[in-house]
Each structure stands twice: as C-alpha cells, then as structure tokens.
Image (spheres, grey):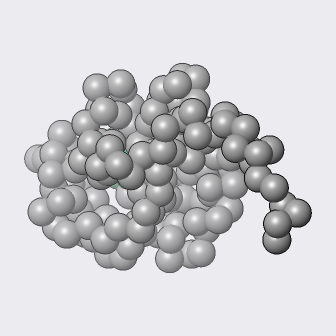
Amino acid sequence: MEKTLAIIKPDAVQKGLIGEIISCWEKAGFKILAAKMVQFTRTQAEEFYQVHKGKPFFENLLNFMIAGPCMALVLGSEGAIQRNRKLLGNTNPALAEEGSLRRRFGTEGTANAVHGSDSPENARWEIHYMFTAFEIIDYQHYLTDVFEKIDYQDH
Ligand code: IDP
Ligand code: MG
C-alpha cells in the first residue's frame, strides 16, 4: 500500500476543521497510518519547503506555516499520492475543483488548508522528515482479526 504525507495546515486547524478533513480522507478510503499535532519552527518550515526557496510566495508560505499548529498525517491507500493530490484539488482554492478539499476548506493561494506529497520520492522524504518509523502504523494492523478474539464476556 502506498503512503503519502498530508498536513492539515494552520488555517484549517484554527478553523476547527481537523475532524471534518480527516473524515473526508477516511470516506475516500485512506487509512490513517500516523497523525500528530506539530508546530513548525521557521527553520523546519524552511527545510520542509526548501524546493520553493527563492520563489515569490516563499516568505508568505513560511509565515503562514509557523503561524499556528498543524496536523501531520501519513495516509495509506493504493495510489495514495495521486489520489490525495486529486482530492486536494488545485493549489489555489479559487481554482480548485468543486468538492475538493482546498475548494471546500481553503481561502486563497497560501492558506489552502491542506498539503499532500506530489511524488513517491517527495512522499518518502516528507514522511521521514515528520515521523519516525515507530510512529507509522503497519497496514497489517488494520487487517488483523484481533477484535474477534477479544472475549467481551470478561468485562
Ligand atoms: P502544492 O501544495 O499544491 O503542491 P506547491 O507549488 O508545492 O503547491 O506550493 C507549496 C505551497 O506554497 C502551496 O500549497 C501554497 O500554500 C503556497 N503557494 C504555492 N503557490 C503559491 C502562489 O502562487 N501564491 C501563494 N502561495 C502559493
Ligand atoms: Mg508541493
């Protein structure tokens, strides 16, 4: 199963949209393999978005990403990277497809509510940047029949 890194950005966290956005991912068939609240420092935001260094929107992006807490997640599904990109929609919420997360929950170019890795190479790098291996659930745990083995009569 493919893994992708997702971030619920500070604007969406601030608006109390964590639950609603996670619910969209679950309904779309993604497994939540990791999740935690994080507060980026400027240095970390610079590192995470290093590919955009020098671009006109870079400073705004850093200021936005350090403005409040984010939730970082690892999502798993077949073709998770491209499926999540499609669910996010266009980078600019105004141009994002009807029903996409950015169209529904974003406000403008920078404050677009959610992040998603854009390639297998970047997904690997971003997941490793945000999480230790110990924090990422093995998909097999979703498939075990452990719940059937619990004897509820004992309680
Ligand atoms: P992506 O998030 O759709 O992959 P990127 O080009 O990787 O888009 O840009 C990273 C982030 O930088 C975007 O999600 C958005 O927050 C911000 N950003 C990108 N392009 C612009 C822009 O033209 N104006 C303002 N902010 C931008
Ligand atoms: Mg990107």
Q: Is residue 30 above or below residue 37?
A: above
- The structure residue drawn at horizontal position 42% and vertical position 56%, both measured from the top left corner, is 72
Where residue 124 sits: x, y (%)? 30, 33
Left or right? Give the position of 128 relative to 76: left
Relative depth, front residue between 54 and 114: 114
Q: How many labels does the image show?
A: 0
Left or right? Give the position of 131 relative to 150: left
Where residue 86 sits: x, y (%)? 57, 32
Where residue 129 sits: x, y (%)? 24, 47
Relative depth, front residue between 82 and 140: 140
Left or right? Give the position of 58 relative to 109: left
- Whether residue 82 is visible to the viewer of this picture, yes or no, is no
- The structure residue drawn at horizontal position 65% and vertical position 65%, both measured from the top left corner, is 19
For the C terminus, the quadrant is bottom right
- The structure residue drawn at horizontal position 57% and vertical position 33%, both measured from the top left corner, is 140
Q: In this view, does 140 lie above or below 62?
A: above
Left or right? Give the position of 55 relative to 4: left
- The structure residue drawn at horizontal position 26% and vertical position 67%, both measured from the top left corner, is 40
* Occupied quadrant, residue 98: top right
Where residue 60 sits: x, y (%)? 26, 63
